[in-house]
Image (cartoon, rainbow, N blue to C red):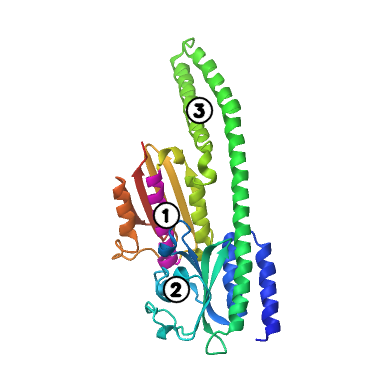
């Protein structure tokens, strides 16, 4: 590949990145472009946990190119940032290695992992913080990656950092718009809908005592009761809409962010439904365990399910928080009720006084149901 062609590919990638406002799409484009400009057979972007000390930061997402979904499932567990991959985490700078197996940091590959020899790693910076690392292996047409390859990928990583920050800002703008719309809806529900329902209920209630026919009186009282129940449900909705910390730290936003991150590795966007006063019914500890459980469940789908659809339900009702993750994949084997992170999910539920159940989904697939008591 001539330098003119490689430079042209780099420019095309930069233009494409700058035009995309979807973070999962940006991450996928970055990995594909890195493989194209460097001549690597395999490429990956390991996304680092952003809320941990630098020395303890591991990989929370791994976007790959060059290995199909069957190969990823055969390998099993996604990398955690150890061995060669950990070099860039502890010391974020470009690295070229001619032979991975001969390097002191080499920790071996898991079963079914394709053979890899040459390596090029480059950190991706967003502002002054490492967002993740580009890992490129198996240089095509040469024994190892060159300085020119490194320069190309470093330039791409710089453009990627800008594109990632741009996509993040776009997500935040959308969240702010949603919050403003929530506030308007909550105000309309309280000032208009509830007041009209309340007035209607009071008018009907005044008629109950005047009714002589028992059947009509019963039916009228049922109508009043139904209006009271509707008002109660609307009040719960308003309370949840007014949970204003959702812009930064709210559970709904964090769930949507996590499922959005999983889109790149799943290959499709999970369907998410949330219901009830989630913010009021969960304290910080419950939210953290719930999010870890959701991440584990989605990770299991990526590794084992071979699914084309995932549905996430999060509900607060009757003093219980329920998280349900259902996929349409191959299902769990009979001897897999433990392992695959299921023990971890069960332990998290039990620590909060709850349970975690795994069951087969009708028509194929697996359902993970995690229930814990709502916070007092």
In the depicted structure, whether residue 202 falls above or below residue 191? above
Q: Label 1, label 3: how many angstroms apart (C-alpha)?
A: 32 Å
Return the mark for residue 294: 1
> Magenta part of the protein: which range?
284-306
- Are the residues tagged 2 and 3 within 8 Å (C-beta)? no
Return the mark for residue 231: 3
**Rendered residue at 46%/20% (across/down):** 221
Which comes before the other along the chain, label 1 or label 2? Answer: 2
* 155 sits to left or right of 257: right
> Which SS class for mark 2?
helix
Foreground mark, 2 or 3, reads 2
Return the mark for residue 15: none
Which comes before the other along the chain, label 1 or label 3? Answer: 3
Q: Quadrant of residue 360?
A: bottom left
Q: Count all numbered tags in the image, as a single digit.
A: 3
Q: Label 2, label 3: how many angstroms apart (C-alpha)?
A: 58 Å
Q: Nearer the viewer, residue 72 or 328?
A: 72
Q: Quadrant of residue 200?
A: top right
Foreground mark, 1 or 2, reads 2
């Amino acid at each position: 590949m001539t330098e003119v062609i490689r430079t042209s590919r780099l420019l095309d990638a930069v233009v494409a990145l700058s035009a995309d406002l979807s973070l999962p799409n940006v991450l996928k484009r970055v990995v594909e472009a890195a493989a194209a400009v460097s001549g690597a057979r395999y490429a990956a972007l390991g996304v680092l946990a952003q809320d941990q000390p630098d020395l303890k930061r591991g990989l929370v997402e791994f976007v790959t190119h060059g290995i199909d979904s069957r190969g990823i499932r055969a390998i099993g567990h996604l990398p955690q940032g150890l061995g060669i991959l950990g070099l860039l985490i502890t010391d974020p700078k470009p690295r070229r290695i001619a032979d991975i197996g001969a390097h002191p940091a080499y920790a071996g590959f898991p079963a079914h992992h394709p053979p890899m020899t040459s390596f090029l790693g480059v950190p991706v910076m967003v502002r002054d913080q490492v967002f993740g690392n580009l890992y490129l292996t198996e240089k095509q047409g040469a024994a190892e990656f060159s300085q020119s390859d490194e320069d190309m990928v470093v330039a791409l990583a710089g453009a990627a950092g800008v594109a990632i920050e741009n996509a993040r800002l776009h997500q935040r703008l959308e969240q702010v718009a949603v919050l403003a719309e929530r506030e308007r809806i909550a105000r309309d529900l309280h000032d208009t809908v509830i007041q009209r329902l309340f007035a209607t209920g009071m008018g009907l209630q005044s008629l109950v005592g005047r009714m002589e026919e028992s059947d009509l009186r019963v039916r009228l009282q049922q109508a009043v009761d139904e209006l009271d129940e509707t008002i109660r449900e609307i009040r719960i909705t308003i309370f949840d809409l007014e949970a204003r910390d959702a812009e930064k730290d709210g559970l709904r936003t964090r769930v949507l962010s996590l499922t959005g991150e999983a889109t790149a590795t799943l290959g499709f966007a999970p369907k998410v439904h949330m219901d009830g006063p989630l913010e009021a019914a969960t304290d910080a500890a419950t939210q953290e365990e719930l999010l870890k459980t959701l991440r584990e469940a989605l990770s299991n789908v990526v590794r084992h399910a071979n699914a084309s659809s995932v549905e996430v339900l999060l509900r607060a009702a009757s003093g219980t928080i329920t998280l349900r993750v259902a996929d349409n994949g191959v299902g769990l084997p009979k001897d897999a009720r433990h392992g695959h992170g299921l023990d971890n999910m069960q332990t998290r539920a039990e620590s909060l006084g709850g349970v975690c159940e795994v069951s087969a989904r009708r028509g194929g697939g697996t359902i993970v149901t995690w229930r814990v008591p709502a916070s007092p």
